[in-house]
Amino acid sequence: MVKKSSIPLLLFCLFMLAGCEVIRTQLATFAVLKSPDTTTVPVSRYYLTGSTVQKAALYDLFTLLDKEKEAGPLQFAVVREIATSYLQQKAYGPLVTFLHARINAQPEDNYNAYYLLMIAYSWTEQDAQAVAALYFDIILKNYPDLIVSGQSIHLACLNQLISLVKEPARLVKYYRELIERFSNDIDLGLAYFMLAQAYEQTGEWSSAVETYAQYLSFSDTIIPGFPNADHYAKQLVDFNNSSKDWTFDNVGTLVATIKAALDSGNATRLWQYRAKVNFFARSWAQENTDDSGMADFNLTEFMRGNRIYYNSTLDAGSNASEVYLRTWGWAQYSVWYLCFRKIYFPSDPEIHGRWEWSGVYYGEKF
């Protein structure tokens, strides 16, 4: 289920604060107003909603609006007061009808983008996110940006669309626009990472890797749902920038080569077949992002002229993309599982699907 709008009613109230005192001053000049129950109400009773007090307030506002014939800041302020009343009452039908009527009557009004924003917000409150997204998109495509109470309408629309839309291609478009236009108003690290994720989902791997590289300039950014974002991005970028000359066509050839190197007892020969980037050495209990074991990883010290033995077959826990070879006789921990992985790197079809010796797990499996 799509989460409701991240623009709370409070934000719209902040948008609406400017000009309210002007309206109240204007209303104070009406010594006597006709009751909403008379036949001379300047608006359909459909628009007079809520309690008796709320209806009277709306009547006063519509009376004032009727006197403001020209589009401008005062008329805009009155419309906002009316719309705020509807939002507070959750009277979404009159709100949408009223604002659409305003837009249709004055299509050149500079404030129409804001009116459409309030209509979009009302649809999110009714769990009609798809309809709301259409309005947010219409504002971006067809209306110039508008700054109200220091807030950009287009920025609000982009943030909403990013939270509502699921199609990766559209997310790429919205994140790019967000970064290009509002880099000083957003968390750039978060925006770059999510743009890279969207590129991945569209299959644009070169763009994804390039964007992850930009994200790494903002390391330690908190990415909701991605606790290992820095590690993930760095692995992709480092692999992309490497020679990749240690890879093998298939796992059978790779394992046979490693076994021959073990039989030779030559640490230097064995070491040349490892992955030159992202190689790991850790215990089974350590996190996948924990590379602390690499600091002291020296094959010569671990072998010390010992004969290293290995199982004739791969471990039963192996699968189509990752296989393990149990070995023993090492100077420390004795038992090591050598890990071989199928490379997932669609950015380079010649490398994608090949195999590498990706790391070592110390000790017996649990």
Image: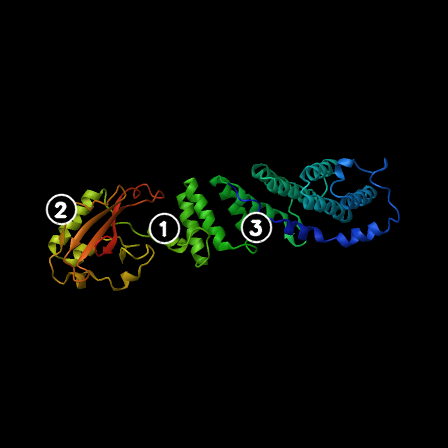
Q: Which of marks 2 and 1 is nearer the N terminus?
A: 1
Q: Residue at x 76, y 40 (%)?
A: 48
Q: Where is residue 71 in the image (x, y as percent from the top left)?
A: 77, 44
Q: How crowded is the residue under tag 3: few (<14 C-alpha within 10 Å), some, or many (20+)?
A: few
Q: Residue 191 carries which label?
A: none
Real-space Cα separation, disc 2 to disc 1, in angstroms: 33 Å
Query: Could you tell me which residue is drawn at 39 percent across and 54 percent down?
Result: 228
Mark 3 lies on residue: 181
Element at label 2: loop
Disc 1, disc 3: CB below 8 Å? no
* Amino acid at pointer 3: Arg
Label 1 or label 3, whichever comes before in sequence order: 3
| Residue 164, picture quadrant | top right
Residue hosting label 2: 312
Q: Earlier in the sequence, mark 2 or mark 3?
A: 3
Q: What residue type is labelled 2?
A: Ser
Kindly indicate whether the residue at mark 1 contacts the one at mark 2 (C-beta within 8 angstroms). no
Q: Mark 1 points at which residue?
A: 236
